[in-house]
Amino acid sequence: MLSFKDQIRSDNANIFMNTAEFSDVHLVNGKEMAIQIDNNEMIDREKRYQYKRSLYADGVYLKELLIYVRAEKFGPLPAVGRTLILDGKTYVISDAINEDGIYSLSLEANKTMS
């Protein structure tokens, strides 16, 4: 019988980050890996941080993404403020949390309205 921690590790690899189930393959910092992009959680987080919107000039807005990636595939937990390139687009990491072997990375990029 697996211990609880062993079961979490197994679920992370075989269920949560499985590209046939929940994840998709994306290019992260030049390396293909399975990730999940969670737009719903990002919307909830944005509601808690509405003050950020007032910091930007007219025509400029903050694009935010929340991704989940396996720690062992990504490498060391990145520091807040570092850049991450996702599918050729550059983002700044605004939050990074290790959730039992899955990294939750909040990403931000300034965008202009065109």
Image: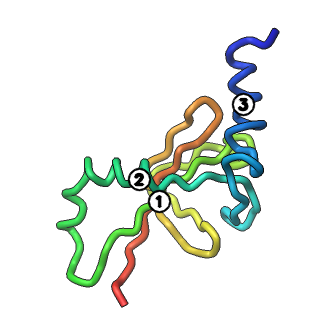
Q: Residue furthest top?
A: 1
Report helix, strand or loop for mark 1. strand
Q: Residue furthest front?
A: 21
Q: Position of residue 41 (x, y in %)?
A: 43, 48
Q: Residues within 10 Å of mark 3 (few under 14, many from 20)?
A: few
In primary-sequence order, the first of circles 1 and 2 is 2
Q: Residue furthest bottom?
A: 114
Front-lying residue, 81 or 100: 100
Identified by mark 1, the residue type is: Leu
Q: Which numbered marker is on residue 65?
A: 1
- Residue 11 to residue 75: above or below: above
User: Seen in the image, is 109 located left or right of residue 72?
Assistant: left
Report helix, strand or loop for mark 2. helix
In primary-sequence order, the first of circles 3 and 1 is 3
Q: Quadrant of the C terminus?
A: bottom left
Write down the residue under mark 3: 11
Identity of the residue drawn at 59% across and 43% down: 77
Q: CA distance from mark 3 to mark 1?
A: 24 Å
Q: CA distance from mark 3 to mark 2?
A: 23 Å
Q: Residues within 10 Å of mark 1 (few under 14, many from 20)?
A: many
Q: Which numbered marker is on residue 114?
A: none
Identity of the residue drawn at 46% across and 56% down: 39
Write down the residue under mark 2: 42
Report helix, strand or loop for mark 3. helix
Q: Residues within 10 Å of mark 2 (few under 14, many from 20)?
A: some
